[in-house]
Amino acid sequence: MASKTPMPKNIAEHILTSFDNFHVLFFETTGKAGDRFTYRRWKELKTAGQERLDLYKEHVARCVKTVSERLGDDISSKENWIKIKQDFSVLLADRYDGPIVESFFNSVLRKIYITEGINEDIEFIPFVSESLTLDPFNPIFRIYYPGKMSKIELFTQIIKDFNFRFKFADLAEDIRFIAGKLTQDLVLEYYTEELTRIDIVKPHFYRGKGLYIMGRMFIGQTIIPLCIPVIHPNTGAELDTIISNVDEVSMIFSFTRSYFFVRAENPLECVHFLHSIMPNKPVSELFSSIGYNRHAKTVQFKEFEYYLEHSADKFEFAEGIKGMVMSVFTLPGYNYVFKLIKNRFAPPKNITREHVIRQYRLVFMHDRAGRLADPQEFEYMRFKLSRFAPDLLEELLTLCSETCYIDGDVLIIKQLFTERKIRPLNLFVDENEFAVSAKAVVDYGNAVKELAAANVFPGDLLMKNFGVTRHGRVVFYDYDELCLLEECNFRPKPVARDDYDEMSSDVWYSVAENDIFPEELRAFMVPQGKLKDEFLLHHNDLFSVKFWRETQKKNKEGEVIDFYPYKRKLRG
């Protein structure tokens, strides 16, 4: 009797169709960002970002269900999956998005065929096939040769070519401003204002209340980034400024920001372009920044493997005070930390492993407002035992034994989270001079306020749970007690009824689970010494019930706060 198992080609075709169905909706959601910006529908843009993140998971789950049903008893046959992969490769031969589709294949496979580490026989490995394929008839950018054109004429033409449907408040004045600012910036940095060529990316980059025109400029062979943020207040759209500094452009694409809406027909070419103007930015983060976060994980894994193959340093404890919930380790020369959930949490932590996982996934889905590090979750990772410092390995096998185990000469980790390495704020202020530390603690308060505006309450507000990026920006990275601001009940601390209450070491008033007393935050947040006065000068309102309730009210009313990742220009 003939086998009822479907041909590998049929399974491959179904997986590809599932990806295409996902990508149609991904493009549809992304494409609507233009209308939402034009008509200032900010709440829809915010909601759409979360909905778009769900699309991938939903389509993978649906595909897994169908493939599992079709394969039946042959679902765990490695030989079958080798053939499916081969047929899938043939189907991708002429596609510009091949590597991204391969990541979708891997996502489906790993839900069905659990493997420790990467199995190169049945999984696609990035960079092996990730060659950049360009469409010569439809490049992602337009080319402008300034020649004898003035910068005002040049930028007038660039804006005209976009054919925006919204109206500008005073486009001529905006162009005059950015032309003058660019000339000044070029002379200061490159001692010339003459440009050889400008490339402008055709798709728009939308996020929050901003639209970003991205490009690059050439002075001879020197590449200079170009970013023109566009804002849209109710008085009409404005070219807000022009940015030509690599570090400032990199901050716009920070790992602490939500993903852009970019309708790029060839996402690989888009990332290749962005990497040409931000060469120090990991390629994985650039894929995340334009919405391809699952492929970004695949690329990040390969970036990590490449580092391991070309280094010899050992995993060690990450700097900072050890936490009660996570074991955190890193490699001295690598720019990420690895976080494992411990088996049990010592008091006063009264949470579960499932709660911690939910919190990290909440951060992944939520508007990070430039103040939360983007966490990535990995499963069944393999590490050579020889790469671990002995004391670290002992802790992982003791405190995280439910998550990791030894198999021969490797450590298998069933689940871990990665985040960019950030200098803990408590260490940063201790090792820097007053002016630098003062700036950081003021930004620490700014971070708490901006998170609140994004409907996030960090929970554990100790300085050790915040860090300073290489750009000097303070972000939060410890999520086990994080919650939505709307879930909190901010209360004034009750006044003692008598001397007995006043002297009691026990809490004499009732406290519900989500009750928060802002005046008590002073004991956790306010730094010591001279930094105390600087912090209180800017953020004394954090210890009032009024601040928190007013922020809750704004969130409830649907107010969308402006989170611009660059220094705003001053308008006269």
Image (cartoon, grey):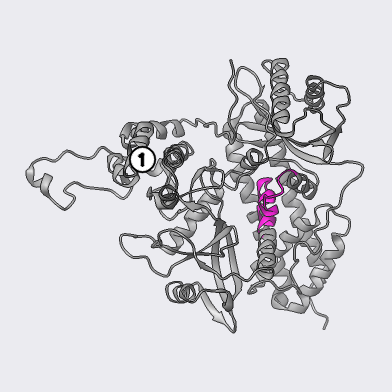
Magenta: main secondary structure equals helix
Q: Residue furthest front?
A: 191
10 Å neighbourhood of mark 1: few (<14), some, or many (≥20)? many
Answer whether residue 248 is magenta in the image. no
Q: Is residue 412 above or below residue 265?
A: below
Quadrant the C terminus occupies: top right
The structure residue drawn at horizontal position 38% and vertical position 30%, both measured from the top left corner, is 550
Q: Is residue 355 above or below residue 432?
A: below
Q: Is residue 209 above or below residue 289?
A: above
**Which region shows up in magenta?**
277-297
Where does label 1 land, which residue?
A: 531
Judging depth in this view, the residue of 275 and 22 nearest the camera is 275
The structure residue drawn at horizontal position 16% and vertical position 48%, both measured from the top left corner, is 508
Q: Residue furthest left?
A: 499
| 228 displayed left or right of 543 | right
Q: Is residue 123 above or below residue 514?
A: below
**Whole-percent x and y of residue 460?**
38, 50
Specify the amino acid type for callout 1: Leu
Q: Quadrant of residue 321?
A: bottom left
**Whole-percent x and y of residue 14?**
78, 61
The structure residue drawn at horizontal position 70% and vertical position 25%, both measured from the top left corner, is 184
